[in-house]
Image (spheres, helix red, strand yellow):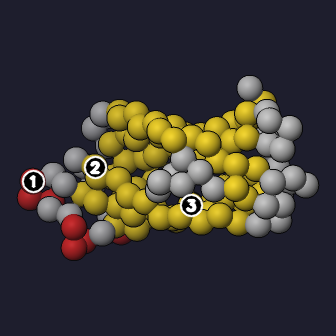
């Protein structure tokens, strides 16, 4: 499978106080991902893979079609942005993974999603 250098990924995460219950080890985070197509042809996001690791070292794998119920087509020079969430049993953890995309020639390729941190604001230095 190809690796595609013409896609840029940016992530922002935030702790959701109103949905979290620290007393029962439930920490809810939202993350917004921006996927920018820097190439010359449209691409389509087909599936995703996540590896979520909490601060105790517990790992959870998540995979499935598309993101937030969509398999968006991203035109050259365009950005697709979505927000989703994760629930951890610890106040800090990481997420990383990849998207499987489809280019205009019918070839599938991976776009790596670099590890990003999910953490309570008071834990970020």
Residue shown at the point (87%, 53%) measured from the top left:
41
Dot 3 or dot 2: first in sequence order is 3
Quadrant (top left/top right/bottom left/bottom right) for the N terminus: top right
Q: Quadrant of residue 99?
A: top right
Q: Is residue 32 left or right of residue 72?
A: left
Query: Which residue in the structure is indicated by mark 1?
Result: 24
Q: Is residue 106 left or right of residue 18?
A: right
Q: Find numbered disc 3 in the image and state the secondary structure of the residue it sits on.
A: strand
Tag on residue 33? 3
- Badge 3 local density, few (<14 within 10 Å), some, or many (20+)? some
Is residue 61 among the parts visible in the rendering?
Answer: yes
Dot 1 or dot 3: first in sequence order is 1
- Badge 1 local density, few (<14 within 10 Å), some, or many (20+)? few
Q: CA distance from mark 1 to mark 2?
A: 11 Å
In the image as oriented, which residue stretches furthest toward the bottom? 18
Residue shown at the point (86%, 38%) measured from the top left:
105
Q: Find numbered disc 2 in the image and state the secondary structure of the residue it sits on.
A: strand
Q: Position of residue 117 (x, y in %)?
A: 45, 53
Q: CA distance from mark 1 to mark 3?
A: 28 Å
Q: Nearer the viewer, residue 34 or 25?
A: 34
Query: Which residue in the structure is indicated by mark 2?
Result: 88
Residue shown at the point (35%, 61%) measured from the top left:
29
Q: Is residue 3 left or right of residue 52?
A: right
Nearer to us of marks 3 and 2 is: 3
Residue shown at the point (28%, 49%) measured from the top left:
88
Q: How many marks?
A: 3
Q: Quadrant of residue 125?
A: bottom left
């Amino acid at each position: 499978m190809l690796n595609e250098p013409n896609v840029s990924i940016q992530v922002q995460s935030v702790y959701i106080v109103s949905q979290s219950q620290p007393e029962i080890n439930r920490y809810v985070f939202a993350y917004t991902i921006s996927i920018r197509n820097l190439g010359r042809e449209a691409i389509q996001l087909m599936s995703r893979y996540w590896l979520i690791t909490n601060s105790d070292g517990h790992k959870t794998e998540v995979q499935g079609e598309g993101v937030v119920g969509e398999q968006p087509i991203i035109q050259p020079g365009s950005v697709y942005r979505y927000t989703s969430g994760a629930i951890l049993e610890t106040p800090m953890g990481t997420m990383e993974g990849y998207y499987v995309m489809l280019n205009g020639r019918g070839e599938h390729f991976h776009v790596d999603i670099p590890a990003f941190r999910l953490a309570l604001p008071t834990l970020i230095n």
